[in-house]
Image: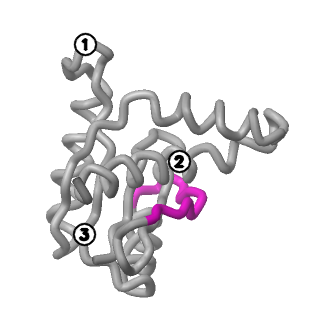
Amino acid sequence: MRILAIDHGTVRMGIALSDELGMIAHPLAFIPAEPFSDFLAQLKVLLKEKEVQQVLIGMPRNMDGSYGPAALKVQEFAAVLKEAIVLPIKMWDERLTSTQANRFMAEAGTKKHARKGKVDGMAAAILLQSYLDRQSL
């Protein structure tokens, strides 16, 4: 089953895609969050082109596991998305995915200014890989 993951952001939405076997996540960079109608149009094209069967959305949680203001925005986003697409949508804990993505890219030697456009897709890939790994247990 092919899964597309979204790392929600107010400026950019990080996008990642699983392979056909649902084992490995690949970052696909990002889609600008605004205007939302453009984001939605680009997302629908990706979903169709890549034959996606499920969407995974990162749910930001505080370190103690509680939900803050960012989680409310993501819940609102997920509710709108559920009305716009016919695929199943799941939420998944995304704590520290952006931090991990930045660290991985820094360790790989990616300059700070070059990370800006790539960190969102990498964060989505980390989110998706954690989900895929959990499903295989």
In the depicted view, which residue is nearer to us: 33 or 55?
55
Near mark 1 (Cα within 10 A), the count class, few <14, some 14-19 or many ≥20, is few
| Residue 117 at least partly seen | yes
Write the start and end of the magenta stretch as one range: 24-36
Which residue in the protein does label 3 denote?
A: 54
Write down the residue under mark 1: 64
Q: Amino acid at mark 3?
A: Gln
Callout 3: 10 Å neighbours few (<14), some, many (20+)? some
Secondary structure category for the residue under label 1: loop
Mark 2 — residue? 12
Q: Residue furthest top?
A: 64
Quadrant in which the N terminus is drawn:
bottom left
Can you tell which of label 2 and label 3 is closer to the viewer? 3
Secondary structure beneath disc 2? strand
Three-letter code, disc 2? Arg
Look at the numbered discs 1 and 3 and tell me whether their residues touch, using CB distance below 8 Å: no
Q: CA distance from mark 1 to mark 3?
A: 28 Å
